[in-house]
Every structure is written in C-alpha cells, then in structure tokens.
C-alpha cells in the first residue's frame, strides 16, 4: 500500500530521532527501516507535548526513510485510531521528503482528516517546515 516495500529489518542506530523544535511541536527525523519498537520513541514524545499544550504540531523529516515494517504500520494506525477524539489538538503536520509516495500518502491523510493542516516540504526547506508547523492557532 502506498508503495511501501516491506523487507526483513536490519537494526540501525537512531531509526527515529527526536529533534529540537519549538515547545508546541513534536519533531522527528526518521532514517532506515522503521519497526514497531521504534514507535516507542515517537508516542511518548507526542504524549508529552499533548500533556503540556492544548494544540500541537508534528514535524516528520522522512528524507532518509527507506521502509516501514508491517508491524510499524499497524502500530502507527493503532495510535492514530486511539487519538480520533483528539485530532482537533493536532493542528498542523509538516512532512519533509522528496519521495512521491510519501507526498501522496500525506495528501491522502490530509483529505481524510481535514481538521489537520498538512504540508510536504522538500529537504532544502526543512527550516521553513519547522517554522510553518510551529505557527499553530
């Protein structure tokens, strides 16, 4: 689905890294192949931001993303479904990527969840992406 290739996972260091961002933004850099266990860094970081702010933005730098395991996709969907009643708190989502399938998936997500303003930025506009996602209402 969405052009994701599922391959056996060879563990790499820092597949998902929490990156510096304004207080109202949960920001991540993703590299290599993401597993369900990698979400153990993402979910607590998002929950911490939600505990501190009524509304937040999310930035995902996916320029080095290669793959996502089926279990990782399932974990992502489970977390998203658990937040259905709180989607109004996720004001903006910025994705940094040059990959067409990521752009298409982001645009589809934006259409499915219009209450979350989504935008894809090329890698050379990473700073602009962070500034944009931080300007939530």
Image: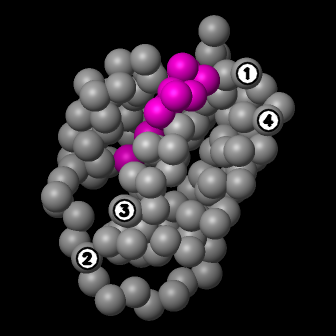
From the viewer's perspective, is 132 left or right of 96? right
Residue at 38% in and 63% down: 74
Q: Nearer the viewer, residue 68 or 19?
A: 68
Query: From mark 4 to mark 3, how far is it between C-alphas?
Result: 25 Å
Total numbered badges shown on the rendered structure: 4
For residue 25, what is the image quadrant? top right
| Looking at the image, residue 23 lies above or below residue 81 | above
Query: From mark 3 to mark 2, how far is it between C-alphas?
Result: 10 Å
Residue under numbered circle 3: 73
Query: From mark 1 to mark 3, how far is it between C-alphas?
Result: 27 Å
Residue under numbered circle 1: 54
Residue at 64% in and 66% down: 40
**N-term-proximal mark, 1 vs 2:** 2
Residue under numbered circle 2: 6
Region rendered in magenta: 84-97
In the image, which disc is placed on residue 51?
4
Q: How did the renderer colour the structure?
A: one colour
């Amino acid at each position: 689905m969405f052009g994701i290739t599922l391959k056996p996972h060879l563990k790499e260091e820092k597949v998902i890294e929490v990156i510096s961002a304004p207080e109202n933004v949960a920001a991540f850099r993703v590299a290599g192949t993401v597993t369900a266990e990698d979400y153990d860094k993402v979910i607590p970081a998002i929950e911490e931001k939600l505990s501190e702010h009524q509304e937040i933005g999310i930035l995902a730098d996916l320029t080095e993303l290669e793959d996502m395991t089926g279990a990782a996709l399932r974990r992502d969907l489970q977390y998203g479904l658990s937040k259905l009643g709180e989607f109004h708190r996720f004001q903006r989502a910025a994705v940094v990527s040059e990959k067409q399938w990521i752009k298409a998936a982001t645009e589809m997500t934006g259409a499915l969840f219009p209450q979350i303003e989504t935008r894809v930025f090329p890698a050379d506009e990473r700073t602009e992406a962070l500034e944009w996602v931080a300007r939530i209402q």
